[in-house]
Image: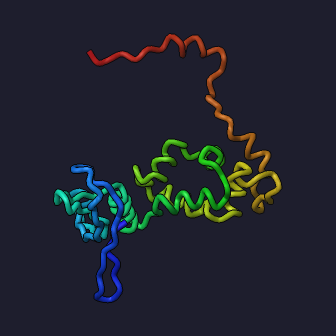
Amino acid sequence: MMTDLFRGNERRQESSGLMCPSCEEFQVTTTNAHIEFPFGVGEAAVTLVAVVPLHVCAACDLEYFDDSAERIKHEAVCAHLSLLTPTRIQGIRKKHDLSRTEFCRITKIGEATLARWERGELLQSAGYDRYLRLLEDPQILARVRTGGWGEAEEAAPGSPEPSRLRARRRFRSGVNSASYPERLAFQVRGRG
């Protein structure tokens, strides 16, 4: 693997062992490249900078980036937005020794959504980012795992007990059985 290593002003390259995708020769070197890329739209648009590996083939002069460059750019966007990186999101789940399926069952986060966050295909919203940061705490995850605050929790002074709160969660329509046939006959008509 050939990479530029910086120590002070010293710079050296190492062989990368990569095969060129164009000429299929093994004369590819890797250097660090500072790239600028736009992010956002309108007044919120900014130019971000990232240092990514640039692969150069000595045989055919092809210069190219690989998937690691996209990952680094995604992490630059996360840093700009103050969001957790995909590695950190995956780390939160693994810290609790949970599979993706189990983590999603407990947290009610969609499994496909979490997979996209962990692969860097999608940015989580600020709200989900805060939720994930809270879930990093084992005590909070334990409370979420039990379905909220549990029966053993003490109610605040003057508030109903948790079992009574659960009983109130049912939806009541206020419609009696006598008006049910009338509701079935109701139709929406367009303006004519």
Q: Is residue 112 above or below residue 57?
A: above
The residue at the point 30 percent across, 66 percent down is 30
Residue 14: where, in percent of width, then height? 34, 72
Picture quarter with the C terminus: top left
Residue 154: where, in percent of width, then height? 80, 60
Q: Is residue 137 above or below residue 9?
A: above
* Closest to the observer, 12 or 170: 12
The residue at the point 45 percent across, 51 percent down is 119
Most extreme residue toward the right, as rendered? 152
* Closest to the observer, 65 or 36: 65
Quarter location, residue 101: top right
Picture quarter with the N terminus: bottom left
Most extreme residue toward the left, as rendered? 61
Residue 59: where, in percent of width, then height? 19, 59
Answer with left or right where residue 164 lies relative to residue 192.
right
* Closest to the observer, 26 or 152: 26
Residue 151: where, in percent of width, then height? 81, 51
Number of numbered discs overlaid on the protein picture: 0
